[in-house]
Amino acid sequence: MNRPFRKVVSGVMFGGILLFSGTPVFATPSTHIWAPSTDVQPYGVMHLTSDAYVPVERDAAENRPDTVTNMGLTVGVLPLDKLNAEVGFDHKSGLGALDDTPMYFNAKVGVPENAFFEFSPAVAGGIYDVGTDNDLTDFNLTYIKTAKTFYIDKFSLGRVSAGYFNGNDKLLLDGNGEKDNNGFFGAWERSLPEISDKLWVAVEYQGTESAYGTWNFGFSWKFSDNASVIFAYDRYNNRDLADTFTIQVDIDFDVFSKLFKKAA
């Protein structure tokens, strides 16, 4: 599935803005709900996402944060079976001063489950929220993550993911303005064929009390082979921030993949 941060002005001011604003937005490598997953777009397949993050309450200063929107495009760029790679970009709006430099970039490489031997986990690493304004939007979160699907007999218990991230220590700050730029993230997710093959659920966590730190609870419905919508609730570790509700529309296009195959 498919990408986080808040209004900042610069370095040390980020902590204060973070404390009294409450609107996140993702950069969009392939994700669960919030943070990158070990999934990687197949070669030549383009992934379009349109996300909205709507505050469901006021923040600690009794302000109602703006709704943030994000439009992103990610494409698979490596024509291999056991090693995949994707690159992407996002345009974000509703972030106040950050709207002057709205472009962000991401990249990821990874291997799928069982790629090299039976029971081997999926592993991925990459970088996201790479902005173009030094110490203002260059959050530059690097990460590594692993995932494995567990079964009892043939019954799926779901996929469990765990990893570690590190970002720009001038921008990833807690509510007191202290750096809080690295930590653990994890997720559990499962399709629910007992109800419908189109239904998927997930619970996700990302550490720190920076604007990236959340619990996320949500589900998606797949309308077709290449289109789905996620509905989720985002609860921030820093309780001075306003929680949000997110709707994410995801569409895959394999036109380029087919063109590449024809050209070959």
Image (spheres, rainbow, N blue to C red):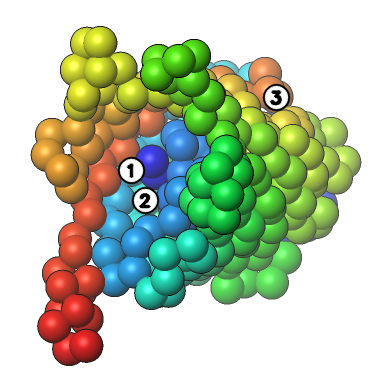
Q: The C terminus lies in which quarter of the figure?
A: bottom left
Marks 1 and 3, the one that precedes in the sequence: 1
Q: In the rendered structure, are the residues bearing label 1 and label 2 in contact, judged by CB atoms less than 8 Å apart?
A: yes
The mark closer to the camera, 1 or 3, is: 1
Q: CA distance from mark 1 to mark 3?
A: 22 Å
Left or right: 125 as drawn, with respect to 74? right
Q: Amino acid at mark 1?
A: Asp
Q: Position of residue 119 (x, y in %)?
A: 57, 38
Q: Quadrant of residue 67?
A: top left
Q: Residues within 10 Å of mark 3 (few under 14, many from 20)?
A: some
Check the image and report above or below for 238 versus 109.
above
Q: Residue at x 19, y 60 (%)?
A: 253
- Residue 258 position (above or below residue 116): below
Could you say which is closer to the camera, residue 52 or residue 43? 43
Q: Residue at x 15, y 43 (%)?
A: 225
Whether residue 74 appears in this view of the structure is no
Q: Nearer the viewer, residue 96 or 113?
A: 113
The answer to which quarter of the image holds residue 81 is bottom left
**Element on which disc 2 rests:** strand
> In the rendered image, is residue 247 in sight?
yes
Q: Which mark is residue 70?
A: 2
Q: Could you say which quadrant of the image residue 72 lies in?
A: bottom left
Spatial separation of the CA atoms under disc 1 and disc 2:
5 Å
Locate residue 197 relative to residue 92 in the image: left or right.
left
Mark 3 vs mark 2, CA separation in Å:
23 Å
Quadrant, the N terminus: top left
Between 129 and 218, the one lying in front of the other is: 218
The residue that mark 3 highlights is 238
- State the SS at label 1: strand
Q: Which mark is residue 51?
A: 1
